[in-house]
Image (cartoon, rainbow, N blue to C red):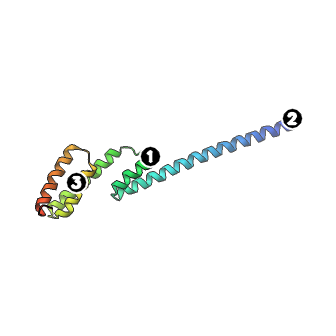
């Protein structure tokens, strides 16, 4: 009788440990999948594909911390690039950068400056 109880306790213990291991593995696998999706979203962001970045984040329901801050930083970076191109009289490229900033940025002051530069670029390249 004692032997049977011992075996029952040992089997129960191993069954419990197997369940703990399974649920731990499943949790790690889920976290790994989320991290891989987040990494792919950041790849879109780094390679300046903002439309795909936003679409992917929404589609996968990812929680990207400070996503608005990321957009504003990228908008500022593109704005500075556009200004440099404008100073070098490369109005076509500058216009493309400014239009991209207009799509990304939600800051009103930045949008007003960008609209001003867009008007200047269009004047310089002949009203296109």
Q: Position of residue 78 (x, y in %)?
A: 25, 55
Q: Nearer the viewer, residue 11 or 59?
A: 59
Q: Nearer the viewer, mark 3 or mark 2?
A: 3
| Residue designated by label 2 | 2
Q: Is residue 61 left or right of residue 24?
A: left
Disc 3/disc 2 C-alpha distance (Å): 79 Å
Q: Earlier in the sequence, mark 1 or mark 2?
A: 2
Using the image, determine if residue 4 lies above or below residue 93. Answer: above
Disc 1/disc 3 C-alpha distance (Å): 29 Å
Estimate how packed mark 2 is, as few (under 14), some (14 to 19) or many (20 or more) residues with alpha carbons within 10 Å: few
For the view shown, which residue lies furthest in the right direction?
1
Q: Quadrant of the N terminus?
A: top right
Q: Earlier in the sequence, mark 3 or mark 2?
A: 2
For the view shown, which residue lies furthest in the front direction?
128
Instruction: Answer with the quarter of the image where residue 18 lies.
Output: top right
Which secondary structure lies at badge 2?
Answer: helix
| Residue designated by label 3 | 79
Q: Earlier in the sequence, mark 1 or mark 3?
A: 1
Estimate how packed mark 3 is, as few (under 14), some (14 to 19) or many (20 or more) residues with alpha carbons within 10 Å: many
Estimate how packed mark 1 is, as few (under 14), some (14 to 19) or many (20 or more) residues with alpha carbons within 10 Å: few
Q: Quadrant of the C terminus?
A: bottom left
Q: Name the residue rendered at 13%, 55% in the picture.
A: 119
Q: Position of residue 111 (x, y in %)?
A: 20, 48
| Residue designated by label 1 | 61
Disc 1/disc 2 C-alpha distance (Å): 54 Å
Q: Position of residue 76 (x, y in %)?
A: 25, 51
Q: Is residue 49 left or right of residue 1?
A: left
Which secondary structure lies at badge 3?
Answer: helix
Q: Name the residue rendered at 24%, 44% in the picture.
A: 107
Q: Name the residue rendered at 44%, 46% in the picture.
A: 61
Q: Position of residue 64 (x, y in %)?
A: 40, 46
Please report contact status of discs 3 and 2: CB closer than 8 Å, yes or no. no
């Amino acid at each position: 009788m004692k032997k049977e109880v011992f075996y029952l306790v040992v089997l129960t213990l191993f069954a419990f440990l197997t369940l703990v291991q399974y649920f731990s593995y499943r949790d790690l696998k889920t976290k790994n999948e989320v991290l891989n999706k987040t990494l792919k979203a950041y790849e879109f962001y780094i390679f300046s594909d903002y439309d795909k970045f936003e679409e992917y984040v929404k589609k996968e329901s990812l929680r990207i911390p400070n996503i608005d801050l990321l957009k504003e930083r990228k908008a500022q970076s593109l704005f500075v690039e556009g200004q440099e191109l404008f100073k070098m009289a490369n109005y076509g490229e500058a216009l493309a950068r400014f239009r991209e900033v207009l799509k990304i940025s939600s800051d009103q002051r930045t949008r007003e400056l960008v609209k001003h530069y867009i008007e200047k670029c269009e004047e310089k390249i002949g009203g296109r």
